[in-house]
Image (cartoon, rainbow, N blue to C red):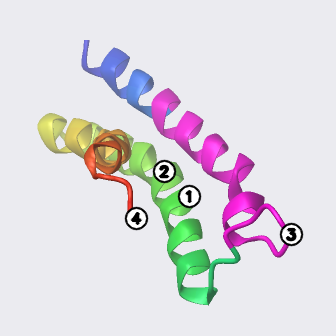
Amino acid sequence: MTKVLLVVAALVDLAIAVLLVGVSGFVTGGGPESMNAGGFAAAAFWAAVIVCIAAPVVGFILIKNGRTAAGLAAAFVPPAGALAAFLLPAPY
């Protein structure tokens, strides 16, 4: 059951990473439809992509070392962060 949950978390993490890469031009691009985000925002954006990719890897390593709860928690950090971001009110 643990491996199934970890695989589900890995698929969700990779889906979030794909979504972030897909909308990266609208956030950090220079086009008329983009937010024209600065360098710090672009770095934070790509750091989020890296975390989405690294979280399941860390989860698999922790589970392999016998730390099941920590592995699942690490793998579900990006989805939990995405849900928390959706709960924040939109800026005015």
> What label does residue 49 carry, if any?
1
Residue sitting nearer the eye, 17 or 92: 92
**Residue 27, image x, y percentages:** 66, 64
* For discs 1 and 3, the disc positioned in front in the rendered view: 3
**Which percent across, then down, holds residue 36?**
70, 77
Find disc 4 in the rendering and name its residue: 92
From mark 2 to mark 1, how far is it between C-alphas? 5 Å
Q: Is residue 90 above or below residue 67?
A: below
Callout 2: 10 Å neighbours few (<14), some, many (20+)? Answer: many
Q: Is residue 65 visible?
A: no
Q: Amino acid at mark 4?
A: Tyr
Of labels 2 and 3, the one closer to you: 3
Q: Nearer the viewer, residue 81 or 35?
A: 35
Residue 29 among magenta residues: yes
- Residue placed under numbered mark 3 in the picture: 31
Q: In this rendering, is residue 67 above or below 47? A: above
Q: Main secondary structure of the magenta part?
A: helix
- Earlier-in-chain disc, 1 versus 3: 3
Please, what is the three-letter code of the amino acid marked with disc 1? Val
Left or right: where does residue 32 sit relative to residue 81? right
Asked whether the residues under the numbered discs 2 and 1 touch, taking CB atoms below 8 Å apart as contact, a structural biologist would say yes
| For marks 4 and 2 on the same chain, the one whose residue lies earlier in the sequence | 2
Q: Quadrant of the N terminus?
A: top left
Asked if labels 4 and 3 touch by Cβ distance under 8 angstroms, the answer is no
Residue in view at x 32 percent, y 20 percent: 5
- Real-space Cα distance between discs 4 and 1? 26 Å
CA gap, disc 1 to disc 3? 21 Å
Looking at marks 2 and 3 on the same chain, the residue that comes earlier in the sequence is marked by 3
